[in-house]
Amino acid sequence: MIQRFIELGQGYSDLYELIEIAETNTHRLTKFIALKTKINEKEVCSLAIVLQAAGESNFQPIYICREGVPQHSKRWDLFQDRATTHNKALTILEVRPSNEFSDKDLYYQYLTGILRMQHVIPAWQ
C-alpha cells in the first residue's frame, strides 16, 4: 500500500474542503487525525483524514491541512464534530513541526513512519 499526503493548505478556509472530502467519501473514510505540535511557542495542529484505496489501486490518500489550526478553536471543534458524526475516533498524536525538516517530503516521510508505527495506517507492503 502506497500512502501519500495531499496537502490542501494550512487549515484556514481549506479546512472546509477537507471536511467536504470526508463528507463525499464516507464509504472510503477510515480515520480522522490531529497532529499536535509547537511552532514559535504556539500550539497548532495539522488536521487530516485517511481514505481507503479506490477500487483495485494500492494508493491510500491522506488529505491534510498542515499546522494552521489552533487546538482550542471553532475549526478544531468543527473537525472533532465531523469525526463524531462519522463514528470515527479522532486520533491525536504529538509530532515535530515541519520547519525542523529541510524538505517537506522529508516531513511527510516522518509523518508516514509515525502513523505506521502507531497503526493508524497500514504498514508498507
Image (spheres, rainbow, N blue to C red):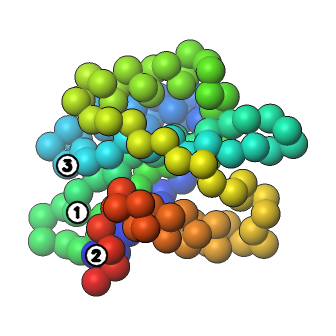
Provide the residue designation for mark 2. Answer: 1
Quarter of the image where the N terminus is located = bottom left
78 shown above or below 5: above
Q: Which sits earlier in the primary sequence, circle 3 or circle 2?
A: 2
Quarter of the image where the C terminus is located = bottom left
Q: Residue at x 68, y 45 (%)?
A: 37
Element type where label 3 sits in the image: loop
Instruction: Decide if residue 74 is in sight here.
Output: yes
Provide the residue designation for mark 1. Answer: 53
* Amino acid type, mark 1: Ala
Based on the displayed image, in which of its 4 quarters is residue 70 positioned? top right
Instruction: Decide if residue 8 is in sight here.
Output: no
CA–CA distance between discs 3 and 2? Answer: 15 Å
Indicate which disc residue 28 carries: 3
Element type where label 2 sits in the image: loop
Of all residues, the one furthest to the top in this rendering is: 74
75 shown above or below 1: above
Q: Which sits earlier in the primary sequence, circle 3 or circle 1?
A: 3
Pointer 3 with pointer 1, Cβ within 8 A: no
In the displayed structure image, the side of residue 46 where residue 54 appears, left or right: left
Q: Which sits earlier in the primary sequence, circle 2 or circle 1?
A: 2
Residue 97 in the image, given as x and y percentages of width and height: 72, 54
16 shown above or below 46: above
Residue 50 in the image, given as x and y percentages of width and height: 34, 51
* Amino acid type, mark 3: Arg
